[in-house]
Image: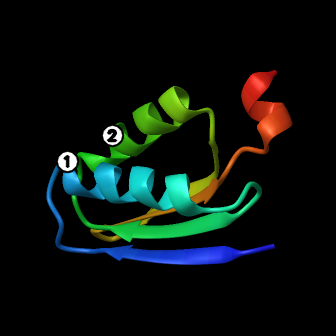
């Protein structure tokens, strides 16, 4: 299974969510995105994006100013279910 690290530190809204969307479009089904960002709005934008795309946040947390998301790209069966 593929892991994709996205260092989005320093990017401001809406760039973190747009970069995650772009990475999800090119990722294979089941891939894990390891996202790190510092924009506080990403705590709202990325979960909203996941509701829109059908992909899943497996883990999210905060380490000081750093937001961390582990996002699993949906499989075709999960996306249509």
Q: Residue at x 29, y 57 (%)?
A: 16
Q: Tell me where residue 54 sits by quadrant.
A: top right
| Residue pointed to by mark 1 | 14
Q: Is residue 7 above or below residue 14?
A: below
Contact (Cβ within 8 Å) of mark 1 with mark 2: yes
Q: Residue at x 52, y 37 (%)?
A: 50
Please give left or right for residue 27 compared with residue 49 in the image: right
Element class at badge 2: helix
Question: How many numbered marks appear?
Answer: 2
Q: Is residue 12 above or below residue 80?
A: below
Element class at badge 1: loop
Q: Residue at x 33, y 40 (%)?
A: 45
Residue 9 image point, x, y percent: 26, 74
Q: Is residue 15 above or below residue 80?
A: below
Please give left or right for residue 45 compared with residue 70 in the image: left
Badge 2: how crowded within 10 Å, few (<14), some, or many (20+)? Answer: some
Q: CA distance from mark 1 to mark 2?
A: 8 Å
Please give left or right for residue 37 compared with residue 11 in the image: right
Q: Residue furthest top?
A: 81
Badge 1: how crowded within 10 Å, few (<14), some, or many (20+)? Answer: few
Q: Residue at x 22, y 58 (%)?
A: 39
Q: Residue furthest front?
A: 26
| Residue pointed to by mark 2 | 45
Residue 80 image point, x, y percent: 77, 24
Q: Tell me where residue 81 sits by quadrant.
A: top right
Q: Quadrant of the N terminus?
A: bottom right
62 and 32: which is toward the camera: 32
| Disc on the earlier residue, 1 or 2 | 1
């Amino acid at each position: 299974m593929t892991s994709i690290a996205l260092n989005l530190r320093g990017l401001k809204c809406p760039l973190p969510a747009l970069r995650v969307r772009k990475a999800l479009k090119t990722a294979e089904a089941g891939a894990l995105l390891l996202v790190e960002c510092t924009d506080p709005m990403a705590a709202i934008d990325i979960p909203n994006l996941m509701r829109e795309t059908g992909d899943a946040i497996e883990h999210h947390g905060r380490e000081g100013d750093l937001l961390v998301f582990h996002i699993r790209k949906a499989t075709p069966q999960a996306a249509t279910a």
